[in-house]
Image (cartoon, grey):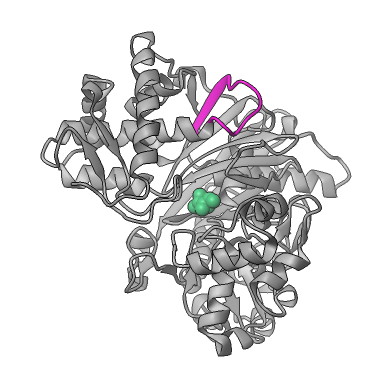
């Protein structure tokens, strides 16, 4: 029975999904998650991250990610569900943009790991920077402007790399490290993204990076999938020699190293290039053609499409693991803001759902849901903006925040596709909440489907492992074949727009866009 392992190291935890694929059977046979706050309290994270003195400084420890990988492989090996010797290939994904800084000891340390000992303590001397900045970090505005100036402006930067310079992207983050800590930069032999770092740990050698994750760096030429010399020079000296090689998403990056083979009796299975969590979700939600929109409600909320050519007005264009283009919009105030609501008003998800169902449209009351600084639109002064109600009205706050999030996603996702969106696939933790999906369907006026598998990034990784293994074996399969049996929308999970409320939201969306425009650069009002 051929098995394929997909791993996803997201902001808040690590998930593993194993799929079984043969002529008659296509099913998930293992699905397990670790949560950084709960399962690794020694790293002191909240929501999977640590904050600096400045609230915009957001980090996590690369050793925590390594620890989680080790513990997940142990779970997999000790679990009775599957025969691990049948695993043909492993692929993975990780939160995008974050960087891991390694010194010249890393490759030798990876080669000589002691299989009797835990992974993370054996890696502490391989880092040239103890903590990794992650996608929530927003401290690099100066560096963004410097890079854009060197590349001929924001538009020229977007035309070259797929995005204007963005605070969370790898390039501006590396430039800041080089400027703030030049000696540590000089001691940095290699810089990985979280995805290629974890692939390297599995392979026991520097792994390549795929164009999907490399397009979240402001360093890759989106047209030919190579590091852009101009972008490298605008960012930091001798950067090209420090970055991983870019290889297609379906390439085999190496074989599982002897450490893992001996430690968990695993076979020397193929390690397929890892990618970012969003490109991986694209596969895991079956978005392999235009006209489909995925909305991922996770730590960040994202919406994305797959097109043959970049969508003209998308805020970010990445490469898709299919080789096409992926158009994406990202919101920082996702599940952490929704969790805040629950805590603040002492509600469970059923109560949140009942409030949403009770009065769709919130009697015209609106909120700009910027609990933290926001990526889309760019908001640098954190704080909820309420219009016509105050903090104490729990119902108005619940509806204001969630309806506000959905209207923001709908308004900004309008530029992601040339085609008419005929279906939305909702994924991520909050997609299990029917009432939230009903708001989404009403706001977009489109049918919303939820998939059976909640973690679409880990599923996408397992599906990519299958695709790459078949290609390497000389029996390539189409992307349509890869995703079928796993990503068909379940009609039982369809949520259709309620015509009674569609017109209400159509009017509110316009008003929301005006409020957003007016308040984006203003201080919070209450
Ligand atoms: C996308 C982004 C986030 C992270 C979170 O650009 O920054 O969605 O990938 O995992």
Query: Which secondary structure class fits the magenta region best?
Result: loop
Relative depth, front residue between 88 and 375: 375
Q: Is 416 included in the stretch rendered in magenta?
A: yes
Where residue 403 sits in the image (x, y, percent)? 32, 30
Residue shown at 60% from the left, 25% from the top: 488
Q: From where the camera sits, is residue 61 visible?
A: yes
Q: From where the camera sits, is residue 432 visible?
A: no
* Vertical placement of residue 78 versus 127, above or below: above
Relative depth, front residue between 362 and 299: 362
Image-based side of 6 in relation to 330, left or right: right
* Vertical placement of residue 316 versus 287, above or below: below
Residue 357 is drawn in which quadrant?
top left
Residue shown at 14% from the left, 39% from the top: 390
Image-based side of 300 in relation to 18, left or right: left
Instruction: Give the residue furthest to the top.
Output: 500
Relative depth, front residue between 330 and 28: 330
Residue 205 is drawn in which quadrant?
bottom right
Image-based side of 163 in relation to 339, left or right: right
Specify start and end residues of the magenta stretch as a single range: 414-426
Residue shown at 21% from the left, 27% from the top: 355
* Vertical placement of residue 239 versus 503, above or below: below
Where residue 526 sits in the image (x, y, percent)? 18, 46
Where residue 135 sits in the image (x, y, percent)? 49, 59
Where residue 185 sits in the image (x, y, percent)? 59, 83
Q: Is 417 included in the stretch rendered in magenta?
A: yes
* Quadrant position of the N terminus in the picture: top right
């Amino acid at each position: 029975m051929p098995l394929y392992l997909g791993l996803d190291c997201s902001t808040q935890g690590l998930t593993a999904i194993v799929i079984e694929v043969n002529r008659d059977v296509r099913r998930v046979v293992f699905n397990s998650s670790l949560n950084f706050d709960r399962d690794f309290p020694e790293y002191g994270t909240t929501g999977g991250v640590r904050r600096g003195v400045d609230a915009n400084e957001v980090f996590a420890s690369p050793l925590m990610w390594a620890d989680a990988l080790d513990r997940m492989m142990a779970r997999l090996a000790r679990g009775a569900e599957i025969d691990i010797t049948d695993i043909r290939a492993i692929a993975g994904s990780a939160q995008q943009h974050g960087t891991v800084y390694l010194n010249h000891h890393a490759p030798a340390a990876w080669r000589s790991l002691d299989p009797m000992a835990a992974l993370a303590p054996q890696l502490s001397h391989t880092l040239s920077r103890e903590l990794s900045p992650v996608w929530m970090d927003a401290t690099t505005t100066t560096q963004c402007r410097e890079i854009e100036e060197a590349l001929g402006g924001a538009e020229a930067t977007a035309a070259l790399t797929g995005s204007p310079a963005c605070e969370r992207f790898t390039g501006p983050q590396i430039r800041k490290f080089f400027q703030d800590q030049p000696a540590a930069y000089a001691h940095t032999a290699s810089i990985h993204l979280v995805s290629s770092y974890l692939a390297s740990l599995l392979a026991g050698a520097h792994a390549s990076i795929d164009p999907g994750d490399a397009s979240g760096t402001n360093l890759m030429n989106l047209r030919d999938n190579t590091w852009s010399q101009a972008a490298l020079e605008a960012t930091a000296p001798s950067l090209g020699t420090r970055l991983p090689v870019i290889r297609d998403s379906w390439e085999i990056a190496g074989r599982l190293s002897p450490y893992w083979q001996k430690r968990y009796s695993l076979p020397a299975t193929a390690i397929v290039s890892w990618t970012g969590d969003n490109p991986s979700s694209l596969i895991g939600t079956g978005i392999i053609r235009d006209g489909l929109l995925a909305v991922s409600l996770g730590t960040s909320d994202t919406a994305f499409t797959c097109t043959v050519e970049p969508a003209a007005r998308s805020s970010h264009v990445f490469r898709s693991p299919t080789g096409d283009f992926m158009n994406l919009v990202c919101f920082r105030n996702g599940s952490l803001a929704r969790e805040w609501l629950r805590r603040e008003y002492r509600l469970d998800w059923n109560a949140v759902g009942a409030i949403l169902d009770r009065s769709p449209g919130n009697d015209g009351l609106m909120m700009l849901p910027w609990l933290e600084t926001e990526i889309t639109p760019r908001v640098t002064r954190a704080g909820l903006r309420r219009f016509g109600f105050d903090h104490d009205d729990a119902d108005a706050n619940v509806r204001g925040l969630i309806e506000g999030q959905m209207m923001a996603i709908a308004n900004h996702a309008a530029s992601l596709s040339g085609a008419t969106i005929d279906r939305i696939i909702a994924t991520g933790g909050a997609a299990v909440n029917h009432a939230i999906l009903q708001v989404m369907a009403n706001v977009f006026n489109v049918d919303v489907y939820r998939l059976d598998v909640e973690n679409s990034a880990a599923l996408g990784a397992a599906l990519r492992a299958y695709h790459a293994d078949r290609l390497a074996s000389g029996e390539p399969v189409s992307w349509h074949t890869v995703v079928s049996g796993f990503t068909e929308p379940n009609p039982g999970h369809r949520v259709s727009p309620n015509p009674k409320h569609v017109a209400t939201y159509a009017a509110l969306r316009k008003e929301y866009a005006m409020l957003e425009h007016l308040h984006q650069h203003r201080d919070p009002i209450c």
